[in-house]
Image (cartoon, grey):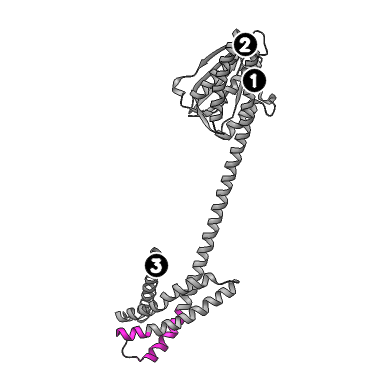
């Protein structure tokens, strides 16, 4: 229904425009305003030709198979036949409505045929060219949009796949280290090992619930960190000395899952486990010019990111941070000062 109303409106608009242009041309060249019935006569002929042309050509022309030459030949032939038939119909309507009584049917038809054929072919061909150009532009725009959408979808899928691969390598890494810790406690302290297994089960359950690439709140991440530290504290005892300074105001801050835990695990592994005296580990979060900087520091021997091998926990985390927050910010920052090594990353606030 809406399409039919749109077609009717377009036909009436075209007819009114054609009649108005002819009336204006006659006025400009003669200097005298043509009578109103001339406008009505031209409008009647325009309706008699334009209405069937829109319907027939709009149905037949798109169905014409073959090259452009064949399509345009069919278009011109059909338009010529429609103009002839429309002239006959228009002449009958003009005489029937009493718009022209001085000229007979044959004379009026002969005059209208010349003007109708010329105007129909001129207006029809111009409109068809404009329509074909618009169709091509629309089709090109649609293809470009589809290509852009497909490209964006491919990038998204690639990022999700990379995140999934990175996290798949990260979670087992944490699991194996935690299980080794629990295993070492079973002979001497089975009750404590059982309790730690419960803690580990809770950590793993939380890990499985997190979809690849999903962000978690800093509060959830710190709960994981504390569970991990409790497991490691059972193994290292006083050798592991931890201080946590994370304000509750940052609890809802979204961070990649296992991000802070990876930094803490790195400190435990290379600072605490490698020295009989153990080491101090500090976890901090502080505001910094529109970002929140999350830091894990230890007083161990220190290291450089250039020394981190591919596939290491920090290398995985660096890739995850880049994929999550982009490359505008350095994914990881390592600083060594006063015997302390601080590894940090920034999260947009």
Work out how far the residue at label 1 is from the one at label 2, CA to CA, in angstroms.
13 Å
**C-beta proximity under 8 Å, tags 3 and 2:** no
Seen in the picture, residue 132 relative to 45 is either above or below; the reply is above
What residue sits 30% from the left and 83% below the top? 97
What is the secondary structure assignment of the residue under circle 2?
helix
Judge whether residue 336 is colored magenta: no
Q: Which residue lies under the disc numbered 3?
A: 4
Find residue 287 and report its horizontal and vertical position in percent: 48, 23
Seen in the picture, residue 192 relative to 18 is either above or below; the reply is above
Seen in the picture, residue 108 relative to 257 is either above or below; the reply is below
What is the secondary structure assignment of the residue under circle 3?
helix
Find residue 198 and report its horizontal and vertical position in percent: 55, 18
What residue sits 51% from the left and 63% below the top? 135
Magenta residues span: 91-119
Judge whether residue 114 is colored magenta: yes
Find residue 70 and report its horizontal and vertical position in percent: 58, 75
Do we see residue 230 in this rendering? Answer: no
The crowd level at tag 2 (other Cα within 10 Å; few <14, some 14-19, many 20+) is some
Q: Which residue lies under the disc numbered 1?
A: 177
What is the secondary structure assignment of the residue under circle 1?
helix
Ranked by sequence position, the earlier of labels 1 and 2 is: 1
């Amino acid at each position: 229904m809406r399409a039919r109303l749109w077609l009717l409106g377009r036909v009436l608009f075209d007819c009114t425009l054609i009649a108005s242009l002819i009336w204006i041309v006659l006025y400009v060249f003669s200097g005298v305003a043509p009578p109103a019935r001339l406008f009505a006569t031209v409008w009647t002929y325009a309706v008699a030709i334009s209405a069937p042309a829109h319907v027939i050509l709009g149905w037949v022309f798109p169905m014409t198979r073959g090259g452009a030459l064949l399509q345009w030949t069919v278009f011109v032939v059909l338009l010529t036949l429609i103009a002839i038939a429309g002239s006959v119909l228009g002449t009958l309507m003009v005489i029937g409505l009493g718009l022209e009584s001085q000229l007979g049917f044959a004379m009026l038809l002969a005059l209208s045929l010349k003007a109708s054929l010329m105007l129909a072919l001129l207006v029809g061909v111009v409109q068809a060219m404009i329509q074909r150009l618009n169709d091509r532009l629309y089709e090109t725009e649609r293809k470009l949009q589809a290509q852009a959408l497909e490209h964006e979808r491919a990038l998204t899928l690639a990022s999700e796949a990379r995140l999934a691969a990175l996290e798949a390598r990260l979670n087992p890494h944490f699991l194996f280290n935690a299980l080794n810790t629990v295993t070492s406690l079973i002979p001497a302290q089975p009750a404590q090992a059982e309790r730690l297994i419960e803690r580990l089960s809770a950590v793993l359950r939380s890990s499985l619930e997190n979809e690849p690439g999903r962000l978690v709140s800093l509060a959830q991440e710190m709960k994981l960190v504390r569970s991990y530290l409790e497991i490691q504290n059972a193994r290292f005892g006083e050798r592991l000395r931890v201080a946590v300074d994370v304000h509750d105001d940052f609890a809802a801050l979204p961070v990649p899952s296992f991000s802070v835990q990876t930094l803490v695990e790195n400190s435990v592994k290379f600072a605490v486990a490698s020295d009989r005296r153990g080491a101090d580990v500090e976890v901090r979060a502080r505001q910094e010019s529109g970002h929140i900087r999350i830091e894990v520091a230890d007083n161990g021997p220190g290291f450089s990111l250039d020394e981190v091998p591919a596939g290491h926990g920090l290398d995985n985390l660096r890739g995850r941070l880049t994929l999550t927050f982009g490359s505008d910010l350095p994914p990881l920052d390592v600083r060594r000062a006063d015997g302390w090594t601080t590894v940090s990353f920034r999260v947009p606030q």
